[in-house]
Image (spheres, rainbow, N blue to C red):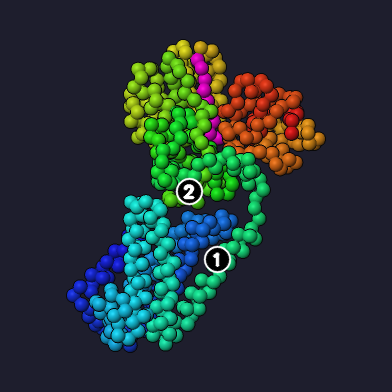
Amino acid sequence: MASLALFAVIATLAAFVGGFDAPGLEPAAWRFVTCTSGSLALGLLGLATFGGIALRGGLSDEVARRFGGKARLNKAHMVIAVFGVVLTLVHVTSACAVAELGIGWLQLFVPFTRVGGPLAQGLGVFAEYLLLAVLITSALRRRLPWKWWQRVHMLAVPLFGLAVAHTVLAESWATPMFTPAAMSASALLLTVPVLHWRARRSLPRPVAAAPTPAQRASTRQLSLLISQMTWEAEGIMSLRLVAPNGVALPPWSPGAHIEVALPSGRVRNYSLYGDPRDRYCYRIAVLRQDAGQGGSQEMHELLRVGRKLPVGLPRNAFPLRPAPSYLFLAGGIGITAMLPMARAIAGRGIPWRLIYSGRSRQRMALIDAVLDVDRDRVRILPEDERGRPDLATLIKVQLPGTAVYCCGPPSMVERVTELVGDRPDLSLHVERFSPALVDGEPFHVDLRRSGCSVKVGGQQSVLDAVRHVVPKVAGGCEQGICGRCKATVISGVPDHRDSLLSAEEREGGQMLLCVSRARSERLTLDL
């Protein structure tokens, strides 16, 4: 949009090189076009300016959803701005066609040079220069540092002020179009911040999604800038996160993840899939799940390049252990955890294989990056082309001592766990990227300190059930990774489904409420 508007500006200015000839229309008609286009341009630029302020100033997510989401509002902002620029060009062009206005090359670019109304002409020229600055930097946004782009883009505010002053001082007050345009601009200037403030105050805040102070304190340890967003596959978007001041980021190792605090207050965990040797950026990939709890939708719809995200320090609950050989099994977005591991092992002279499966090639991210590690040791298995991987055969042919790493959907992880269970000479390391909550068997949880009991449905997590009676119970990733919802089991047999707790912690009675369930009819928790 910005490139198109900039091209229109350059093309219009180029038309003045040989002088302007105004055939066809009478001077009165050109004057009407001048005043009308200027008034309309003022209204559109005002709407774009204050709409941009609302978007950049943290427009409430609930308010944005009423108008189709921030992505749609941002597109509307750009379209309105482009139409405002086009009408500005029509205004300038038609003004040069009205001989009695006395506007030529000199008056077009040098302020205060018009004989009649030098102040209005000077303010209009200054507004032109600010408009050019905003357009040029918007067209070069991807090549400019985000801070510089933002600072220049905020010139739209004084630009609109100069445009209003130019309109008031110019002769356009004599036209019937000026009064509604000026009134609209003034009303917009006064009411947009007030309406935005009132809307934010009137909206209810979701209690369950809001993180506790302890959650925020542990999550917001880094404030990183989104420097790049890329579509890696159908429904999968990657983010490149950097420090705003360009300093090196904390180190990490293959298998590590970071916690991301979303604008809504949700906390989500994402595996780091980049190169640990690159200390100046983190890379994560997000699969959109419309049937999920809203975290991935929020990442896809609301995040944009240039926005800052609060994230936690890298943590590794899925480390790469020494072994004589390796088998990496990745299903779908689980490739993000497997890719750094394969890179770390490649070139060491250790036997390894990576099997990457997915529903279709179009929905499998980072295929080229995976093949670049070692094409001879990697197999890409799109289900619609080659069927599902033969996990039984893959496990059966592994050499004794092989470390089997698996990250994928619950069905894949459960099948690999079952197969490796028949091979005690292999070691198994798994990570689930989606919780397995549904088992169709409800059970009861007794809360010892609270003195009450709750029923956990077959499609409900213990955390959700407990929160109905103990709202302050901590939560976080809801994937069995972060450990914030850890609780002590006093009696009963838990069904552990997390990827964090050690064998010693589980034997000591620890349990993660977000994903784990019960093997017995009742559990008693120290809550």
Identify the disc placed on residue 308: 2
Identify the disc placed on residue 205: none
Q: What crowding class fits label 2: few (fewer than 14 Cα within 10 Å), some (14-19), or many (20 or more)?
A: some
Work out whether mark 1 precedes mark 2 in sequence or the reverse, and give the earlier one: 1
Q: Is residue 126 above or below residue 408?
A: below
Residue 14 is left or right of residue 499, and the answer is: left
Q: Are marks 1 and 2 in contact (CB under 8 Å)?
A: no
Judge whether residue 429 is colored magenta.
Answer: yes
- Secondary element type, mark 2: strand
Question: For residue 167, which quarter of the picture?
Answer: bottom left
| Residue 86 appears in the picture as rendered | no
Residue nearer the viewer, 322 or 112: 112
Give the residue displayed 64% in from the left and 53% down from the top. Answer: 205
Q: Quadrant of the N terminus?
A: bottom left
Residue 80 in the image: state x and y as whole percent: 43, 66
Write the start and end of the magenta stretch as one range: 426-434
Q: Quadrant of the C terminus?
A: top right
Residue nearer the viewer, 520 or 176: 176
Give the residue displayed 65% in from the left and 23% down from the top. Answer: 506
Residue 285 in the image: state x and y as whole percent: 45, 39
Give the residue displayed 25% in from the left and 77% down from the top. Answer: 106
- What residue is disc 1 on? 193
Dominant secondary structure, magenta? strand
Q: Is residue 118 above or below residue 431?
A: below
Residue nearer the viewer, 137 or 387: 137
The alpha-carbon separation of the residues under discs 1 and 2 comes to 23 Å
- Secondary element type, mark 1: helix
Q: What crowding class fits label 1: few (fewer than 14 Cα within 10 Å), some (14-19), or many (20 or more)?
A: some
Residue 73 in the image: state x and y as whole percent: 48, 60
Give the residue displayed 27% in from the left and 66% down from the top. Answer: 10
